[in-house]
Image (cartoon, grey):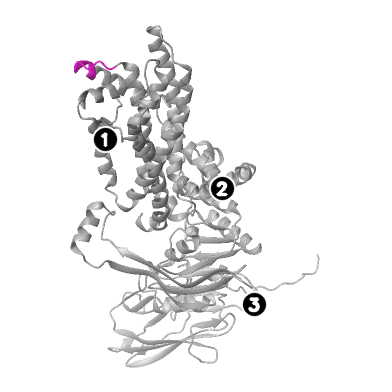
Amino acid sequence: MIGRLLGHPRALWARREMLANLVSRELKARYKGSLLGLCWAILTPLFMALVYVFFLRLLARGIPLETVLIGVFAWQFTANCVQSGLTAVTGNANLVKKVFFPRQVLPLAGTLANTVNFLLSLGVQTVLLAFLLGARGEAIPPRAALALVVLVYHGLFNYGLSLWLAAANVYFRDVQHLVGVLLTAWFFASPAMYDLSMVAQVTAGRPGLYDLYLCNPMALIITAYRALFLPDAVFPWGWNLLPAALLPLLLLLGGGLLFQRAQRNFADYL
Amino acid sequence: MEPVISARQLGKCYRMRGLGPPTLFGALKETLRRRPPNLFWALRDVSFDIPAGRTVGVIGPNGSGKSSLLGLVTGTIQPTRGAVRTHGRISSLLELGAGFHPDLTGRENVFLNAAILGIAREDIRRRMDAIAEFAGLGEFLEMPVKHYSSGMYVRLGFAVAVEVDPDILLIDEVLAVGDLAFQLRCLDRIRDFQRRGKTILLVSHALQTVEEFCHEALLIHHGRVVASGPPPDVILEYIRHYMGEGGYLYTQEFGTRAVEFEQVTLRDGAGVETGVFTAGQALHVDIAYRCAQRIERPVFGYSLKTGNGLYLYGSNTQLAGYELPAIEGAGVIRLTLDPLPLLAGNFFLSLSVHSWDHAIQYHRREDWYPFAVRNPTQEPGLVRLAGTWSQPPAG
């Protein structure tokens, strides 16, 4: 059961060298050709955050930069995993058709490469936050270290997503177009460039709607990062967070089972 | 002894989906139309056993199911019917450079590829110099592989793949790449594998290679094994019955047909019609011809090529000083090669008949008549040269 949940860890452990090599291939290949190298991993979400803050000011919604920064950085991790998950198998068609190995290695390598990326951007985020908060005489609370626990959960969620998308995209090649559209919708439905207080405002008087909004695991994850990094943020504990907390685990379990079944015919469809 | 590779009623069926990659819309359309899926059996009812240490060649026209068979043995594709069982570590030389990343250097790709093939990092680090040397890359090893020539790419892939040290080696047509020197080195490696008692399954269109390396050959046609046994016999069967369909050798026929070959019969020394000859014994070719009119001073010619298309020898009645004043009606002319100087292999005989001044081709059949030669002696090579040894007195 646990084994299935994680996608056959023994087989994956036996292939850890391959996994490590694929992760470093991802990372090296991503940053080798570009001048600023790894900087792009951080600059992209940073620019995005600045753009959102600017537009939100225009819309007279004063969302502090720190809040948007945390949201967009965390969102970027998931968005990257969705992208790498989609192409995890189809992009390695040559390998899948010709070499036998547990195929779970491919989406896992993509997720891990993005995790390394995210860890680096978390470092930058911490520095930026310290600077922004310091300007107001505040500091990052020590509990921010717990962000690593959230990160593990976030990573498992992303891996589950990758498993689904990687398998689906082999059988139906237009999944990637569909996902492109859905990803944009999901971004606006997640509290990346706003926070839960704004959602509470909009859904005031309709608590059912607010609870539905909270079913989105990204709402939970982003809010958790904020509650850890920002000194005056409070985590909205409540039973209405339970669906969002369980969903990633179900996704991972289902994704593991589906991927294991689907991978038998991968070579036929590539 | 227990077979290392054993296939039982192996079948692989593909669902034909038309052109282009599969899509959600396509699947929806299919479901709405409720058409029965278009099935294609790439392999059907294939059974064989390969004992340890044997080298087996798989031949057949393009699209006959050879690559599907290798895929099934590797485990990359799943059988629709039956099963294939293998014992020991498998490495396939069908993925030369699969998984190479264009932006990484040769060295980085060696580590990556080795990890994919399941070789420990330490082993590769120790063997790095040998790999680089075998691939003949020199300072290019530190360059991104996107700048490599296709030959360098494949050489590096091969150099890594043979480091796996498998029990079973699968080879798919990879020996056709690279320059001659590299090909020879590859063949050398394969011989080395054979000496060390590895089991090899080799798919090739180069019949000469199959002939030379394999203990046994399987002929696959339309997904079924139609012949198996000693390579020369199977190859001859292939050439005779199936080569027309997309084979690599191009037979052709032309001429004015003022003289026409009616029937050509290959006979051995005892006069028995056959397709398999013995090195050093006689080979007779009886050419029955028919003339539309009287032809003055015709010239009959022949040439021989190896299974790989290498031109071996050609001659004709004019060069041989066998002048025919005139022919008319029907007749037979016999070509005799005695002793046959060819050693083991598959060969093609071309025949022609033309005018004395070579201006008019009456009838020409290029690579039309295949035959095989078996060599009972241990002499290696293509032809027997009449060499003698002696010890000349000193002085």
Q: Which residues are magenta?
A: A56-63
Is residue A209 visible to us here? yes
| Chain label for disc 3 | B
How many neighbours does mark 1 have within 10 angstroms: few (below 14), some (14-19), or many (20 or more)? few
- Please rate how many residues cluster around mark 3, counting C-alpha atoms within 10 Å: few if below 14, some from 14 to 19, many from 20: few
Chain under label 2? A
Q: Mark 2: which amino acid?
A: Ala
| Position of residue B364 measured from the top left corner of the image (x, y, whole percent) | 35, 77
Residue picked out by circle 3: B377
In the image, residue A59 lies in the stretch drawn in magenta: yes
SS label for mark 3:
loop
At label 2, counting other C-alpha atoms closer than 10 Å, the crowd grade (few under 14, some 14-19, many 20 or more) is: few
* B116 and B363: which is toward the camera: B116
Indicate which disc residue A14 carries. Answer: 2
Rendered position, B368 above or below A97: below
Above or below residue B136? Residue B172 is: below
Inter-mark Cα distance, 1 to 3: 85 Å
Q: Using the numbered discs, state the Cα–Cα distance from disc 2 to disc 1 in whole angstroms.
A: 41 Å
Amino acid type, residue under disc 1 in the picture = Leu
Percent position of residue A209, x then y? 23, 33
Disc 1 + disc 3, Cβ < 8 Å: no
> Against A76, is B389 above or below?
below
Label 1: chain letter: A
Labels 2, 1: front one: 1
Secondary structure under badge 1?
Answer: helix
Badge 2 element: helix
**Which residue: 54% across, 77% down?**
B230
Q: Are marks 3 and 2 in contact (CB under 8 Å)?
A: no
SS majority, magenta: loop
Residue A172 lies in the magenta-colored region: no
- Residue A151: x %, y % from top left: 44, 31
Which residue matches tag 1? A212
